[in-house]
Amino acid sequence: MQSNSGSGSPGAILFVLPWAPAHAGGVTGVVLNLMRHWDGGLRPRLLVSDWACRRPADIDGVTHFRATPLGQASPLGLAKALLAGPPQLWRLARLLQRSKVRAVNFHYPGGNVLGVALLKRLGIYRGRLILSYHGTDVRRLEGRLDGWVQRLCLASADAVVVCSPSLGERLSRTLDGILPAHRLVTIRNGVDASLFTPQAGHGRAQQPYLLSVGSYMPVKAHELTIRAFARLAVQFPMLRLVIAGPQGPELPALQALVEELALAGRVELRVNLRPLEVAGLMASARLMVQSSRSESFPLALLEAAAAGTPIVASRIPGHQELVKEGRTGTLFEGGSVVACALAISAALGAPARVQAMARALRQTVTRELSWEASVAGYAALAD
């Protein structure tokens, strides 16, 4: 059985996410943008690897399906997989064949890759297998069974994609000895320069504000940004702080922190905004402030750069690959509230200088980092 057999349509590339695409940020945003700008010959399709769906199910226009026979990487999970695995693999093979899938691209890969990897090893699926890592999905192996699963999946992959060289180095260190170095490929994230533009804000807001964009997760360090803003509140009495991102576990604690620091009315926490709303916020913000503890090649900074918004960001590898200190933005020591506050204050005090840096970064981003360029990289791997 070959998934790329048949005539007529040119075949498909199947993008796989481990969750439903409810919000367009982060990893989901990367996948949706790749699909939206896809012009690689193959038809783009989206699959959600959903353990609850033993058979393919259409939910809100997206296919949900249990893409792996293994639920938990444990002896009990393996025993269940041996019993239920063959029928599930057959359903997966049929799905790939009927859709004429020639390439499968897992984003945030894990045990969900196992089904396609097994079909590839058995010669049932003869298309390409591409694994895309984004940062928080990089993890160490947990036990022998998990190690066996990950080794099989990585050995079966035709390419392992990272969005930045620093992420590639971290992945190689974490998976030392089991990641084939010659299959590691860097394809940078892109930006939609027609959406994220200086004109998206329709002029400056009446009250100046700082903006931070990212999910409400600890790694984004929104707490640090709020505390840094609190140190500036008296010095800049008209200044506000807006944080926007997908729903996350840190939101209640951040809301409590805003109340504790008496910043109600000065700090606004927005949730699950549409890309157009984020573009408008970015274009009107005085500064984009990102205090993340760890990033790979963040969409938020790319989008702020395309919008022409000056950037103040923590000095971490994922930020340093885009922002060059004193030339295209301002970097501060990560994890330091004081350093963040000082960097913001200095940037606000030199508007002409930071705007010049923002224009320089916008030229680079809009010229070199488009989604079309990202698609071209993936299309080459899918051939």
Image: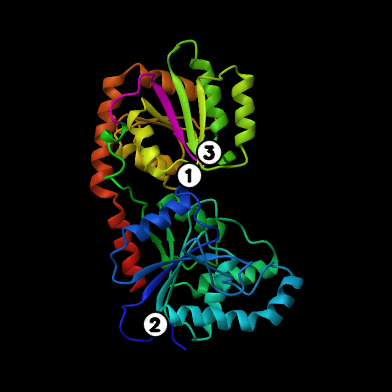
Residue type at tag 2: Asn
- Where residue 73 appears, as percent x and y from the top left, is 69, 67
Query: Which quarter of the figure is the C terminus placed in?
Result: bottom left
Q: For this rendering, which residue is in front, 192 or 292?
A: 192
Dot 3 or dot 1: first in sequence order is 3
SS of the residue under disc 3:
helix
Q: Which mark is residue 4?
A: 2
Determine whether the residue tagged by mark 2 lies in a helix, strand or loop: loop
Q: Residue at x 63, y 72 (%)?
A: 148
Q: Which of marks 3 and 2 is nearer the N terminus?
A: 2
Front residue of 295/304: it is 304
Which residue corresponds to mark 3? 220
The answer to whether one can see residue 120 in this image is no
In front of the other: 196 or 180: 196
Q: Does the magenta stretch include residue 7?
A: no
For discs 2 and 1, the disc positioned in front in the rendered view: 2
Q: Give the range drawn in magenta.
A: 202-215
Give the dominant element type of the magenta stretch: helix, strand or loop. Answer: loop
Q: Of the residues shown, which amino acid type is indicated by label 3?
A: Lys
The structure residue drawn at horizontal position 26% and vertical position 49%, both measured from the top left corner, is: 368
Residue 298, image x and y in percent? Answer: 42, 45
Magenta run includes residue 207: yes
Residue 295 badge: 1
* CA distance for labels 3 and 1: 9 Å
Q: Quadrant of residue 221?
A: top right
Foreground residue among 266 and 121 = 266
* Mark 2, other Cα within 10 Å: few <14 / some 14–19 / many ≥20: many
Using residue 102 as the reference point, say whether residue 294 is left or right of it: right
